[in-house]
Image (spheres, helix red, strand yellow):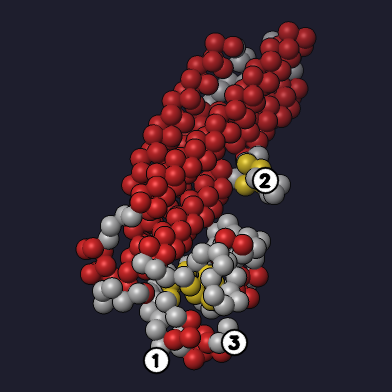
């Protein structure tokens, strides 16, 4: 008899798009501020005022992002618990599961850690933007002052157009150069934020699922299937162990190669199962059981 209940994988696209919208709006506001700077006669006082305006924009952004994480990271953990409760037959439906969700000690700690880590990573995004924009403004201000000193305020309009064009590009590039991750990949800030929170919420969901399953005495799980085209495809439907050194020749979830499965933006989830020998025929055949 098959002993396997899998529910649809959660999606947080709507919520994540709202967060990404905060970053898009903030970057647009900063871009407008930069484009309004009069580069033909930029003074240090003006540059300082622009930097203060940008600092205020980023401060509001950080506040919105912090509140978003505090609201939505517990949702991912709760959904992971629901997945375990339904999969293990504790209740019949997702709706019933939501009424009895409780955070065990592991998942209470998980929520705190996930919130703190995500907020810290998002703060680094805004700090990166702030640092690059401040540097660009300082450099452009110095170049304008030097140009006006050496060539004169009344230098030819054509020359000024060339200089202004180059300086304008320098300011714009400070927003567009993006973030370089540990693997050397370059991301625009809003794209990086989307990838980051998708990855963080998926990881929190999986860990909560595992924590709840292990707390209920479950040692195994099955990786979801959605027809992946990358290296994830070789892990779809595979039985894994949720703790080290379980009976049977099943890979431990903590030792899976992150280049292949559960990588950034990975959509795969884990469904706990008490007995792999009671999986449906197709899954038992896939796993050689």
**Residues at marks 3 and 2 touching, judged by CB atoms closer than 8 Å:** no
Q: How many marks?
A: 3
Looking at the figure, which quarter contains the C terminus?
bottom right
Residue located at (26% from left, 77% from top):
92
Vertically, is 129 above or below 275?
above
Residue located at (67% from left, 45% from top):
182
Tag 1's secondary structure?
Answer: loop
The nearer-to-camera label among 3 and 2 is 3
Q: Is residue 257 left or right of residue 262?
A: right
The tag earlier along the polypeptide, 2 or 1, is 1
Q: Residue furthest right?
A: 150
Compare residues 135 and 199 and report the one nearer the observer. Answer: 199
Q: Quadrant of residue 56?
A: top left
Q: Is residue 136 left or right of residue 284?
A: right
The tag earlier along the polypeptide, 3 or 2, is 2
Compare residues 233 and 45 and report the one nearer the observer. Answer: 233
Does any portion of residue 194 appear in the rendered image? Answer: no
Q: How far, Cα to Cα, is label 3 from label 2?
A: 37 Å
Compare residues 36 and 109 and report the one nearer the observer. Answer: 109
**Residues at marks 3 and 1 touching, judged by CB atoms closer than 8 Å:** no
Q: Which mark is residue 288?
A: 3
Looking at the figure, which quarter contains the N terminus?
bottom left
Q: Quadrant of residue 141?
A: top right
Query: Residue 42 location, x and y as percent?
Result: 61, 15
Compare residues 130 and 224 and report the one nearer the observer. Answer: 224
Q: Which mark is residue 182?
A: 2
Query: Residue 212 location, x and y as percent?
Result: 38, 62
Does any portion of residue 52 appear in the rendered image? Answer: yes
Residue located at (53% from left, 21% from top):
51
Vertically, is 230 above or below 2?
above
Q: Which mark is residue 1?
A: 1
């Amino acid at each position: 008899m098959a002993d396997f209940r899998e529910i649809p994988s959660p999606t947080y696209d709507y919520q994540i798009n709202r967060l990404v919208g905060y970053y898009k709006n903030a970057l647009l506001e900063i871009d407008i501020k930069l484009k309004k700077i009069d580069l033909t006669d930029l003074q240090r006082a003006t540059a300082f005022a622009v930097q203060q305006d940008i600092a205020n924009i980023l401060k509001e952004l950080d506040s919105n992002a912090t509140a978003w994480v505090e609201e939505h990271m517990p949702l991912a953990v709760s959904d992971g618990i629901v997945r375990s409760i339904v999969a293990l037959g504790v209740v019949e439906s997702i709706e019933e599961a939501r009424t009895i969700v409780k955070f065990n000690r592991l998942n209470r700690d998980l929520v705190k850690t996930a919130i703190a880590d995500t907020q810290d990573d998002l703060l680094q995004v805004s700090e990166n933007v702030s640092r690059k924009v401040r540097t660009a403004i300082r450099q452009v201000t110095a170049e304008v002052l030097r140009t006006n000193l050496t060539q004169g305020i009344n230098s030819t309009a054509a020359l000024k157009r060339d200089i202004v064009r180059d300086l304008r590009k320098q300011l714009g590039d400070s927003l567009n150069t993006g973030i370089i991750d540990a693997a050397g990949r370059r991301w625009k800030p809003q794209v990086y934020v989307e990838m980051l929170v998708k990855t963080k919420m998926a990881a929190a969901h999986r860990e909560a699922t595992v924590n709840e399953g292990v707390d209920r005495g479950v040692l195994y799980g099955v990786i979801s299937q959605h027809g992946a085209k990358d290296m994830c495809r070789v892990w779809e439907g595979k039985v894994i162990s949720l703790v080290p050194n379980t009976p049977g020749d099943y890979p431990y979830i903590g030792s899976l190669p992150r280049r292949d499965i559960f990588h950034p933006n990975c959509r795969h989830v884990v469904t706990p199962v008490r007995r792999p020998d009671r999986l449906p025929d197709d899954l038992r055949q896939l796993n050689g059981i």
